[in-house]
Image (cartoon, rainbow, N blue to C red):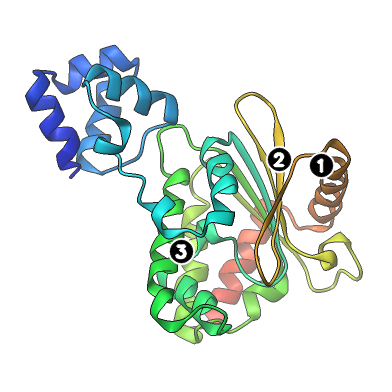
Amino acid sequence: MNDALRVALSDTGHTIESLAERVGVDPKTVGRWLAEGRIPHPRHRLAAAEALDRDIVDIWPDTSRRRDPIWFRPWQEIEREAVSLRWFESAVLPGLVQTEAYARAVLGGAGLIPRGDVERHVAARLNRQGVLNRDDPPQFTAVVDEAVLRRPVGGRATMHEQLRTLVAACAEPHVRVHVVPSSVGAYAGLNGPFVIATGPDHRTAGYLDNQLQGQVVSEPDDIAAMMTAWENVRGEALSHSQSLDLITEVAETWS
């Protein structure tokens, strides 16, 4: 339960219904903020904090900003505000759909993060996944190479859980996953992973990752190149239903 929100309601005399009316959402939505600890959309957070005469961070502490490295914070803000996320990965599953065990294996397996910091990074990654659980989540479309499904990250049990969890996530209407089959030869995805985010103002930004840190890009020429790459990888991928069948099939090979 979000105790800070509960106390703020009590102190101000607001009810779930009256706060919902002030913010412009259904009372059930405010109930989920309270009972399930969901993080509202930024504009709803602002309206609720103003109605309750609180700072936003008093009700929804931004813990991830304290956990993630400084260079990642600009992208984190873009990711939070996005109405659409298009994500390609060739080596691992996207961070927003990783299980805890899979994320721990990815972050700790390379040896680039000090052992004592791995759990902090895992917590930050899991915290970011709240963007897909908010009341108005972005349309999330991921394309992954089939090799991602068959790489034994964390061992057989971890892979089985991860792929089953991925299939379950795709039951949500805003989550779509496509797989580029191993039969495809050279394609744009071989040049590396990337993410394209579109904001509520229709502005588009991209994110590129490397061994040291990520890079946020927004220049029109760079975005155009990333869009071309996206069209290529999406065009080589299986349909959503075909991809889910393949993911389910591969998941059983890990059991």
Q: Residues within 10 Å of mark 1 (few under 14, many from 20)?
A: some
* Secondary element at tag 3: helix
The residue that appears at 8% across and 24% down in the rendered structure is 11
Q: Residue 97, position in %: x, y?
A: 51, 59
Q: Is residue 129 above or below residue 5?
A: below
Q: From the viewer's side, name the closer residue of 200 and 145.
A: 200
- Give the vertical position of 214 relative to 159 (above or below): above
Callout in the foreground (1, 3): 1
On the image, which quarter does residue 244 sit in?
A: bottom right
Q: Amino acid at mark 2?
A: Ala
Query: Where 205 falls versus 184 (above or below)?
Result: above
Question: How far apart, in angstroms, are the residues tagged by discs 1 and 3?
Answer: 31 Å
Is 17 rendered above or below residue 252? above
- Percent x, y of residue 136: 46, 32
Q: Quadrant of residue 47?
A: top left
Q: Quadrant of the N terminus?
A: top left
Disc number placed over residue 165 in the picture, else none = 3
Whether residue 248 sits left or right of residue 191 in the image: it is left
Check disc 3 and give the amino acid type: Thr
Q: Earlier in the sequence, mark 3 or mark 2?
A: 3
Dots 2, 1 in contact, CB < 8 A: yes
Looking at the rendered structure, which numbered label has been put on residue 205?
2
Please give the name of the residue rendered at 56% of the width and 68% of the height, measured from the top-left corner: 248
Return the mark for residue 223: 1
The x and y percentages for residue 21 are 27, 12
Q: Earlier along the polypeptide chain: callout 2 or callout 1? A: 2
